[in-house]
Amino acid sequence: MMNKKSRARTRHRRAHWKVDVPVLVTCANTDCGLRTPPHAACRHCGMYRGRQVMPPA
């Protein structure tokens, strides 16, 4: 049978559960420049790696 973990031990273990700031890169399209997640098409202009992959919003 396991003993109950105290509140201090539980909180000490959870002290490292921090939320990181999401990584964003600037869109390569010179007209756009919107910050987007890496390896994803820009939601504003629809460009990905120099190609138009979806219609602009």
Image (spheres, helix red, strand yellow):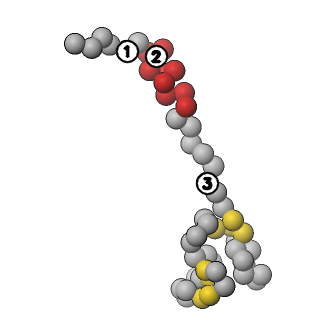
Position of residue 21 relative to residue 3, above or below, is below
User: Which disc is residue 9 wearing?
Assistant: 2
Quarter of the rendering containing residue 35: bottom right
> Left or right: where does residue 24 sit relative to residue 55?
right
Residue lying farthest to the left in this orientation: 1
- Residue 1 position in % (x across, y down): 22, 13
Q: Earlier in the sequence, mark 1 or mark 3?
A: 1
> Which quarter shows the C terminus?
bottom right
Mark 3, Cα crowd under 10 Å, few <14 / some 14-19 / many 20+, is few
What amino acid is labelled 1 in the image? Lys
What amino acid is labelled 3 in the image? Pro
- Residue 44 position in % (x across, y down): 62, 78
Residue 23 seen in the figure: yes
Position of residue 47 relative to residue 10, above or below, is below
**Which residue is drawn at the image coordinates 64% and 57% (left, top)?**
23
In depth, the one of 12 and 57 nearer the eye is 12
**Which residue is drawn at the image coordinates 72% and 81% (left, top)?**
29
> Left or right: where does residue 15 sit relative to residue 34?
left
**Which residue is drawn at the image coordinates 37% and 15% (left, top)?**
5
